[in-house]
Image (cartoon, helix red, strand yellow):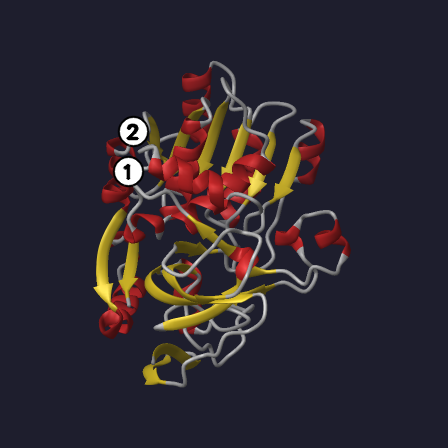
C-alpha cells in the first residue's frame, strides 16, 4: 500500500509499505480523505518539537471506511464510514481516570508520535472511530477533527448563549471556532491581519470581523459589545497578542489558549490578576467528535467555502510546499487517498 512519509525534515516520500494487520480491539480502515493541518507543515519543516521522525503516513484529520473489524460494543461494522479521532490515550493515568483523555500524560497523536492517516490503510482503536451521519460525505467529514479543536476551546472558555467571544486568528481553527461560537447562540468577533480571511469569514456568516492593523482592537471590541467580550479564543500563538490579551476581555473574562507560540512568551500577570481572568490552555479535543459531526450535518458549517482545495496524495508534497510559502492563499486543503 502507499504511505506518505516524512523521513526527516524536508524529506518526504510516497512509499510502498506493507499493509497493516488487524489487531485486537482495532479496526482496519481504508482511508479516503485527510486534511492538512498547520502541524503537518511544521513537521515537514522540522519546526514542530513534538514530532518523532520518521513519520509513517502524516496527517491526523482522517476519514475512511471500515474494511475489517471484530465484535465491538460501538455497533460498528464493515462498510461504515468513520472519522478517526487521532488522540490515542493510555487509559491508565490520572487524566484518563478523570476522562480528560486529551490531557493524557502519555498521549500519542496519530501522524505526530505514531503512524498517521495519509496511508491507504490504517489499523486504529475501535473506541476512537466515529460513525458520522449518512447525509455527510467523506470529504465534508474531513472537517470534523479540526472543528473539534475549536469546540473544545469554546468549552474550555465556557462560552454561553448570549455572550460575546473574540477569536484571534482567522485561519481554519479560528474560523471553525467562530462558527462553533455562533452555533452556541453566542456572538463571535473574529480578529486577523489578512483581509481575504476576514472576507471569507463574513461569507461564512461571521458578522463582526476586524483587521487589527487598521485600528485599536479593544476600542473596536467596546464598540461591538458595549463593554468587552466575556471570552476569548486565542488561535495565533502570537507573542504580541498574548502580551495584551488581557485587554481583549472584560473583568472576570475567560481566555482559552489554542495557538502554539514558537517559544516562551510574556504575559502581563499583573493585569490578569487585576481583572481576575481565567487563563485556560486548550489541548486537542475531548468528546467533541459527535457534536462536530452533527453541526456539519445540520449545515451550520459551510464546508464548501472552507475547503480551499482537494489534491491527490501524489501531489501532497507540492501543495505542502506551496502552503508553507504562501499560507495566506489557503484555508483548508484536503488530501484524497
Q: Position of residue 259 (x, y in %)?
A: 50, 50
Q: Position of residue 301 (x, y in %)?
A: 33, 37
SS at mark 1 in the image? loop
Q: Position of residue 299 (x, y in %)?
A: 31, 33
Residue at 46 percent of width and 26 percent of height: 184
Sequence-wise first label, 2 or 1: 2
Which residue, given by chain and number where applicable, does mark 1 sit on? 302
Relative horizontal placement of residue 104, taking residue 166 as reference (left or right): right
Q: How many marks?
A: 2
Residue furthest out toward the right: 94
Residue at 42 percent of width and 54 percent of height: 83
Front residue of 30/335: it is: 30
Q: Is residue 122 above or below residue 149?
A: below
Which marked residue is nearer to the observer: mark 2 or mark 1? 1
Quarter location, residue 7:
bottom left
Quarter location, residue 25:
bottom right
Which residue, given by chain and number where applicable, does mark 2 sit on? 205
Amino acid at each position: 500500500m502507499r504511505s506518505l512519509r516524512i523521513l526527516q525534515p524536508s524529506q518526504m516520500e510516497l512509499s510502498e509499505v506493507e499493509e497493516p494487520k488487524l489487531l485486537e480491539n482495532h479496526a482496519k480502515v481504508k482511508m479516503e480523505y485527510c486534511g492538512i493541518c498547520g502541524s503537518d507543515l511544521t513537521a515537514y519543516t522540522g519546526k514542530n518539537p513534538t514530532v518523532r521522525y520518521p513519520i509513517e503516513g502524516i496527517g491526523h484529520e482522517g476519514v475512511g471506511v471500515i474494511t475489517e473489524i471484530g465484535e465491538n460494543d460501538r455497533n460498528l461494522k464493515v462498510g461504515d464510514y468513520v472519522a478517526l479521532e487521532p488522540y490515542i490515550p493510555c487509559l491508565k493515568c490520572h487524566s484518563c481516570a478523570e476522562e480528560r483523555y486529551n490531557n493524557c500524560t502519555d498521549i500519542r497523536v496519530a501522524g505526530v508520535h505514531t503512524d498517521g492517516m495519509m496511508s491507504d490503510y490504517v489499523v486504529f482503536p475501535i473506541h476512537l472511530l466515529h460513525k458520522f451521519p449518512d447525509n455527510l460525505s467523506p470529504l465534508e467529514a474531513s472537517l470534523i477533527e479540526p472543528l473539534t479543536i475549536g469546540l473544545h476551546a469554546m468549552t474550555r472558555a465556557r462560552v454561553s448563549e448570549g455572550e460575546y467571544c473574540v477569536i484571534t486568528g482567522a485561519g481554519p481553527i479560528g474560523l471553525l471556532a467562530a462558527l462553533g461560537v455562533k452555533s452556541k447562540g453566542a456572538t463571535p468577533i473574529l480578529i486577523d491581519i489578512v483581509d481575504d480571511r476576514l472576507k471569507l469569514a463574513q461569507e461564512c456568516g461571521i458578522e463582526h470581523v476586524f483587521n487589527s492593523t487598521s485600528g485599536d482592537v479593544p476600542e473596536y471590541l467596546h464598540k461591538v459589545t458595549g463593554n468587552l467580550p466575556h471570552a476569548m479564543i486565542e488561535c495565533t500563538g502570537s507573542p504580541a497578542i498574548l502580551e495584551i490579551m488581557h485587554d481583549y476581555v472584560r473583568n472576570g473574562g475567560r481566555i482559552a489558549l489554542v495557538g502554539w507560540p514558537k517559544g516562551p512568551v510574556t504575559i502581563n500577570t499583573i493585569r490578569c490578576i487585576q481583572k481576575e481572568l481565567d487563563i485556560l490552555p486548550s489541548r486537542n479535543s475531548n468528546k467533541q467528535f459527535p457534536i462536530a459531526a452533527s453541526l456539519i450535518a445540520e449545515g451550520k458549517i459551510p464546508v464548501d467555502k472552507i475547503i480551499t482545495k482537494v489534491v491527490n496524495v501524489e501531489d501532497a508534497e507540492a501543495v505542502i510546499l506551496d502552503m508553507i510559502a504562501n499560507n495566506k492563499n489557503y484555508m483548508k486543503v484536503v488530501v484524497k487517498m
